[in-house]
Amino acid sequence: MVLRDGTGYLQGVLSRKDLPEATWERFGTLTQETSVRLEGTVRADARAPGGYEMHVADLEVLGSCPDFPIQPKEHGTQYLFEHRHLWLRSRRQVAIARVRHEVVQGIRDFFYDRAFTLVDTPILTGSIGEQAGELFSTDYFDLGKAYLAQTGQLYVEAAAAALGKVYCFGPTFRAEKSKTRRHLTEFWMVEPEVAFNDSSDNMRLQEEFVRYLVGRVLERRSEELKELERDPTPLERVRAPFHRISYSDAVTQLKDLGSDMIWGSDLGGDDETLLAQQYDRPLFVYNYPKGVKAFYMKENPDDPQTVLNNDCLAPEGYGEIIGGSQREDDHDRLLARILEQGLDPKAYAWYLDLRKYGTFVHSGFGLGVERTVAWICGAPHIRETIAFPRQIHRLYP
Ligand code: 4AD
Ligand code: MG
């Protein structure tokens, strides 16, 4: 039988002649996922998976397991997600959880080692961070509506003025109607913000960060990647420099590739996939049209129709894993953008203060943990990369 204790897998060997009759009979009643306590001798054996096996001398059943709902056969996706609480025990899900864990630890170590300060930003907020149409709201005492944070960015901008290099890392919420393989309604995002970094510095930091995370998984989680049947070759190619292409050049290239994309619209998922397929490692697309991006991005002084931002597109069809930008640091321009987008300037008075009291060039970005883990694992859908995914049609379990 195969044993799992949270540290790994071990083959248990029982031989009838060495066991008391009652123990042998108990062995006969075991079913998949029964919880047991064992005594025996662990021996090295080159033929055993993992190089060791346990010769069992005694066996106690702690929790029987009649008819475990997930059997070693094909189950539909819907069924598996209904049984997510049990499906988590399968080898593939265990491997994904460990890769995610490595990525999360890598995020913390990367920023700690570079003297960034972690600042925890609120989840209940009074202003819109990204997209008005994609907010979850809740009643908040006498103050009207509170929104679940779509981003911690505006708050880390305030913290960057105090601490220089900062980041926040937590769950964010978007009431997106998208049912794609890249969207969840609750996902984890890490958002560094750096005083005095411009847009080019920002891309260099992203490059170093993504390379570090991928390298760390390759180095420490190769067993898990093997379990996932993930070919490491494309991941080994993730080295600086990443390719850089302006939005305008990306549109030209996409048109040449047969896309009906026009200048001024955002890149759709299919466009991102098509574009990224032309390159052998992650790709930065920079300076998007102002009209499709958030109010806080800095206008490009060389071309006011665009902003100083970038997306980072993962290869192999995984699309955008990072969105980042230099921030509008001029008070009047920022106020104009807030008004233009129909946002309430009162809710942003504190954010505008940052431009009134000692403004400075600064930049930052947000990396989505689930999209990054899906890419590294080669998982077809990001919902497998979080223990209990939240989607429009999923709130259970
Ligand atoms: O591009 P986004 O919307 O950027 C921001 O939120 C900025 N405030 C970040 C910053 O500059 N501090 O989101 C950043 C990343 C995306 O690239 C993607 O990886 C992930 O967050 N993301 C999602 N992941 C899963 N499901 C969704 N619905 C997501 N929306 C964004
Ligand atoms: Mg984005």
Image: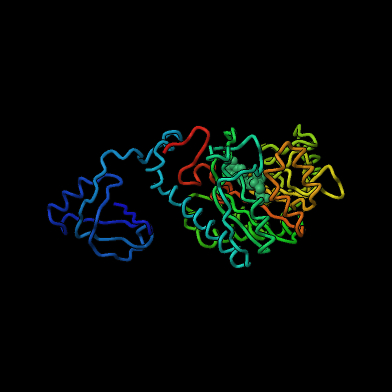
138 horizontally vs 159: left or right? left
Q: x, y (%) of residue 183?
A: 58, 39
Q: Residue furthest front?
A: 142
Q: x, y (%) of residue 274?
A: 69, 40
Q: Report the number of numbered marks.
A: 0
State which quadrant residue 72 falls in: top left
Q: x, y (%) of residue 51?
A: 37, 62
Camera-nearest residue between 114 and 118: 118
Q: x, y (%) of residue 324?
A: 70, 50
118 horizontally vs 273: left or right? left
Inspect this view and state whether residue 284 appears. no
108 horizontally vs 198: left or right? left
Q: How is the image coloured?
A: rainbow
Camera-nearest residue between 212 and 219: 212
Residue at image x 52%, y 40%?
A: 141
Camera-nearest residue between 217 and 81: 81
Q: Which residue lies furthest to the right in this view?
A: 302
Residue at image x 72%, y 59%?
A: 204
49 horizontally vs 28: left or right? right
Inspect this view and state whether residue 54 appears. yes
Which quadrant holds the C terminus?
top left
Residue at image x 69%, y 46%?
A: 348
When the figure is inspected, residue 220 is found, relative to residue 341, above or below; the finding is: below
